[in-house]
Image: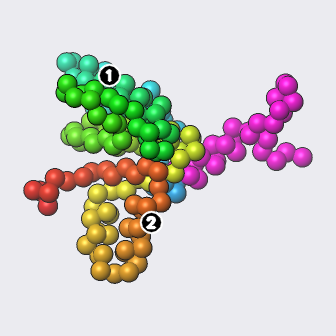
Amino acid sequence: DYVGYLKTSDGKGVMCSCIKNASLHKLYDEAKIPRKWWDNTLYDWNTRQDSKGYDLGAQQKLSEKVQKLFDYYSKNVSNIVNGYPPTITHGGMRDKLHSLVLEGGNGSGKTFLISVTLQDAIRRGHSAYFIEWSDLIDSCRSFHKEDAQDELRIILGTYDLIAIDNATPYDNL
């Protein structure tokens, strides 16, 4: 009887890839990760062209550095989540790496990067949540309502990683 596990040549049981993918997709859905980016990895990000297919030119080096930073973050996510963030040097300063803040125009890859980072964290056994800035602000505006308070507490207090997308600077609100 097939129950979602297969035996390897050395007799060990391993989860069938179709069952594993279905389980991961359920977790991605619960984390609210946009379906458009499911099953992508950091290495699916094109560091040579923008989302419209135009060459990045001089921006390619920056794109490659961003990809390298996200790779480093993903590899260290367990340490970060467990309170042991690595130290990085940026702008001539050394600092603990715990949060990433992205800035860029439409189509620059911010949503893609946070989506694949959350998926990687989930694959590593961590809980994650993707939320749009506007939804978070709505919850804050409704904070006087008990259910909104509960929702906000759950979002901010339950997950190992939270990605907030499409944040708007305060002066534009």
Residue 89 point in image, percent of width and height: 28, 26
Q: Amino acid at mark 1?
A: Glu
Which residue bears the numbered disc 1?
64
Q: Is residue 164 above or below residue 102?
A: below
In the rendered structure, the answer to whether residue 154 lies left or right of residue 90 reads: right
In the rendered structure, the answer to whether residue 116 lies left or right of residue 91 reads: right
Q: Is residue 161 above or below residue 16?
A: below
Query: Toward the viewer: 48 or 126?
Result: 126
Location of residue 149 (image quadrant): bottom left
Asked if the stretch drawn in magenta spans residue 93, the answer is no
Res. 154 mark: 2
Q: Is residue 7 above or below residue 133?
A: above
In the rendered structure, the answer to whether residue 136 lies left or right of residue 147 reads: left
Res. 43 mark: none
Residue sitting farthest toward the bottom? 145
Q: Quadrant of the C terminus?
A: bottom left
Q: Amino acid at mark 2?
A: Ile
Q: Which residue occupies 34% across, 81% down?
A: 145
* CA separation in Å, label 2 and label 1: 35 Å
Q: Which residues are magenta?
A: 1-28
Q: Residues within 10 Å of mark 2 (few under 14, many from 20)?
A: few
Residue 118 point in image, percent of width and height: 45, 44
Q: For numbered disc 2, what is the local secondary structure? A: helix
Asked if the stretch drawn in magenta spans residue 21, the answer is yes
Q: Is residue 10 visible?
A: yes
Residue 125 point in image, percent of width and height: 58, 44
Query: Toward the viewer: 36 or 150?
Result: 150
